[in-house]
């Protein structure tokens, strides 16, 4: 077998990416973003004895808690993790937004919305072998933007991967799994199984594995369905560790029940409330959680942004903010400038107001626009400040982190490269 040069041999200097400096690695680095991984999922799986590797990480590596980005949604956080900076820099502040230039509500999946380079772009251009595997295809083009060579594919479209497009082909054969359903635990398992195969066969310098939160939307921490998922994950992490990878694990956001004691969803239909209280077409409520995969959350999360109609003035803004603040279940209402500052968001891509609901409550637009028929289990979702705490774990001991540093999930690459070797 050939003995390829390690990244640190071929790349001797650190790279500066979006103002942060990253040391080349001595061994392959695998960063895992476990979608919707409230810390309690890991704790419960360890307590149940089904996650021996995660337990070992706690004993022999490093376990920290970090803050994700608010809105605690998938795309803003995955992009923060792979750029090392918040949405105010990289521009992706939702899955979905109201484009003020075109005056249309659009998905934010297109790489044209990305305002910063990724860690993968920089390292692949410096000669590192990079592999990016995501569960859902919606993230693939953003994560792989401007990567030079390397491998980038989604489990969702694994059957369609080509050497030319994705840097790899015959994936189902290589991984030894059938194409998983987009609504399944297997979609995430495919990501882990493919990651292990790639580490065995190609040994990328940097690998990013990003799962889907299908299981976390359905099952609470400690339940059989959740523990089975973490036991599965634990087996693959064990294998990655045995193969010599440095592992950093974090989440894009947490997850909470959004229900009352009887399991009924606590929903504020904000567009209906505002239409009734301030008038029809005076406001436009945008839910940045919106994406094509709504079966497990009905497009309901704990964060919304509100655009005021033309002709609105400062007094209207105060009036409408007060109306929203008075609704039971609302935790916080901020103006555009306040939200951009507090949550580090791009002001041109959020509305005049930002509303965050409490832990057990979600925000919808109009009741007529949400199809909850796909929700067979009590609603669990995310988006708010209540889902901001996420795990930040390493299979290595870290050198000291300054005590005044606010730990973020998007520090995971930085800490793995600079503090774990
Ligand atoms: Zn997510």
Image (cartoon, rainbow, N blue to C red):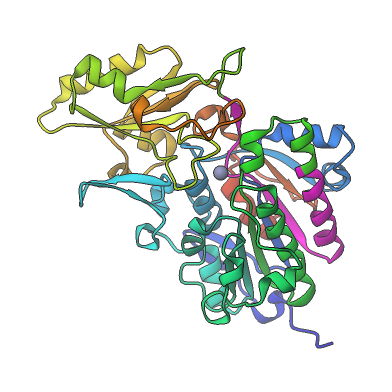
Split into quadrants, the picture shows ligand 1 in the one at top right
Residue at point 79% right, 41% down? Answer: 228
Q: How many marks?
A: 0
- Does residue 238 belong to the magenta stretch? yes
In the image, the segment drawn in magenta is 229-257
On screen, residue 335 above or below 396 = above
Residue 215 visible somewhere in the drawing: yes
For the N terminus, the image quarter is bottom right
On screen, residue 140 above or below 86 = below
Q: As drawn, is 227 to the left or to the right of 253? A: right
Residue at point 66% right, 76% down? Answer: 170
Q: Position of residue 15 (x, y in %)?
A: 56, 68
For the C terminus, the image quarter is bottom right
Residue at point 73% right, 73% down? Answer: 174
Q: Position of residue 346 (x, y in %)?
A: 35, 45
Q: Position of residue 412 (x, y in %)?
A: 63, 51
- Does residue 40 belong to the magenta stretch? no
Q: Position of residue 216 (x, y in %)?
A: 65, 37
Q: As drawn, is 361 to the left or to the right of 378? A: left
Residue 198 visible somewhere in the drawing: no
């Amino acid at each position: 077998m050939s003995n390829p040069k390690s990244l640190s041999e071929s790349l001797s200097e650190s790279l500066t990416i979006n103002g942060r400096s990253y040391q080349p690695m001595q061994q392959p680095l695998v960063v895992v973003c476990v979608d919707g991984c409230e810390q309690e999922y890991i704790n419960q799986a360890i307590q149940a004895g089904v996650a021996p590797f995660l337990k070992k990480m706690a004993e022999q590596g490093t376990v920290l808690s970090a803050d994700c980005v608010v809105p605690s949604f998938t795309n803003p956080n995955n992009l923060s993790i792979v750029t090392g900076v918040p949405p105010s820099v990289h521009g992706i502040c939702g899955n979905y937004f109201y484009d003020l230039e075109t005056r249309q509500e659009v998905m934010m999946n297109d790489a044209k919305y990305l305002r910063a380079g990724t860690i993968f772009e920089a390292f692949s251009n410096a000669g590192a072998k990079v592999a990016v595997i995501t569960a859902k295809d919606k993230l693939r083009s953003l994560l792989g933007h401007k990567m030079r060579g390397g491998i980038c594919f989604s489990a969702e479209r694994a059957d369609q991967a080509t050497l030319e497009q994705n840097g790899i082909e015959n994936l189902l054969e290589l991984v030894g799994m059938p194409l998983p359903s987009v609504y399944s635990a297997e979609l995430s398992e495919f990501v882990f199984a493919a990651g292990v195969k790639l580490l065995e066969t190609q040994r990328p310098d940097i690998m990013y594995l990003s799962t889907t939160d299908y299981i976390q939307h359905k099952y609470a921490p400690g339940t059989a369905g959740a523990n089975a998922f973490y036991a599965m994950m634990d087996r693959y992490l064990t294998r990655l560790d045995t193969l010599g990878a440095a592992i950093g694990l974090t989440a894009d956001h947490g997850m909470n029940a959004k229900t009352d004691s009887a399991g009924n969803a606590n929903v504020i239909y904000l567009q209906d409330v505002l239409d009734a209280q301030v008038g029809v077409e005076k406001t436009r409520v945008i839910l940045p959680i919106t994406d094509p995969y709504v079966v497990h959350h009905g497009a309901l999360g704990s964060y919304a942004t509100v655009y005021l109609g033309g002709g609105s003035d400062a007094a209207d803004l105060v009036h409408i903010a007060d109306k929203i603040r008075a609704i039971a279940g609302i935790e916080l209402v901020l103006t555009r400038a306040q939200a951009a500052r507090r949550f580090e968001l791009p002001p041109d891509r959020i509305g005049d107001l930002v509303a965050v609901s409490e832990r057990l409550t979600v925000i919808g637009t109009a009741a007529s626009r949400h199809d909850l028929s796909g929700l067979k289990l009590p609603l669990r979702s995310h988006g708010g400040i209540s889902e901001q705490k996420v795990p930040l774990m390493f299979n290595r001991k870290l050198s000291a982190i300054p005590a005044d540093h606010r730990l973020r999930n998007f520090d995971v690459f930085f800490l793995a490269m600079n503090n774990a070797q």
